Image: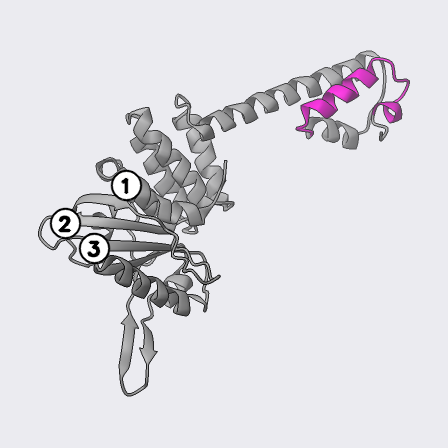
Amino acid sequence: MVSSPHEAMHRIFQEYPGLFSRVSEVLGVDIPPPTSATALPTDLTEARPVERRVDTLLRIETAHDGPFLLAIEAQGKKDPRKTVSWPYYVSYLHNRYGLPILLLVVCQDHATAEWAARPISIGLRQWQTFALYPLVAGPHNMPVITDVAEARKDLALTTLAAITHADNPDVGAILKTLSTALRDTPEAIADPIIELTAQGLGNRPAAQQWRNLVAVDLSFYKSPLSEELRDEGRAEGRAEGRAEGLLLILDVRGIAITDETREKITGCDDPQLLHQWLNRAATAASAEEVFAEE
């Protein structure tokens, strides 16, 4: 499974286009809820050999204000090149579709969020020809949702909140709230939430917390992450059983081993290597023969 916070931070809006209306409310921007949303091509490449792609692009329909385009960028760190590419995205999309454009930047740390929120001005000191004001969602303004009832009301917003707070010391409580809220949720709804959360946490310590919660609280689901955890559990079980069998054979055959070797056996999580040692132990005359390098 691909573990990419970058993917999850923008792809969640593809899965749940209505999420933006709740995010805009959280961010204090009065944007009417959409009546529909259509995913558009994200390739902004021109005929010349310069390729530019926005992370996610949605056409949002509203009942009163008409349609607009929502360009979403997942930003993991400060990138000075964005002061060039973001204005290009907005001007290109406005020229191509003739619709209002809104740029939403999703971040996971305060420094990047503060940087992304700075207006981008193009023009002279005396007169601005173009000014871009990105709307930013990050740990500085996304809610910390630890109430299960609140999480159940809006699983998509809770998932995005968990992703943006991936480095929060209290992220464990947030993830526990989300896993509890998913217990009574239909599998078709829970599966993408489980996977997006895992992607969004990346390789942070919180990712292992989420895997443990999925393994315990959501063990009845058959999502790719759940199946991966079950496979890991079966492998760990095989390794543990072979380690115990190896120690028993060594003991019965009177082959002495050191405490260091015992720890080497019990700490090995490779069932194939343990199987190899187990076969050698049946005929070896010493511990050296059992653990000799190939």
Residue to which mark 2 is pinned: 62
Colour style of the rendered protein structure: one colour
Residue 146 shows in this picture = no
How crowded pointer 2 is (Cα within 10 Å; few <14, some 14-19, many 20+) is rated as some
How crowded pointer 3 is (Cα within 10 Å; few <14, some 14-19, many 20+) is rated as many
Residue 111 shows in this picture = yes
- Labels 2 & 3 near each other (Cβ < 8 A): yes
Q: Earlier in the sequence, mark 2 or mark 3?
A: 2
What's drawn in magenta, residue-wise? Answer: 268-290
Question: Is residue 9 or residue 127 the one in the foreground?
Answer: 127
Residue to which mark 3 is pinned: 68
Q: Amino acid at mark 2?
A: Thr
Residue to which mark 1 is pinned: 16
Q: Amino acid at mark 3?
A: Phe
How crowded pointer 1 is (Cα within 10 Å; few <14, some 14-19, many 20+) is rated as few
Instruction: Name the secondary structure under disc 2.
Output: strand
Q: Specify the principal SS of the magenta part.
A: helix
What is the spatial separation of the Cα atoms under label 3 and label 1, in whole angstroms?
17 Å
What is the spatial separation of the Cα atoms under label 2 and label 3, in whole angstroms?
8 Å
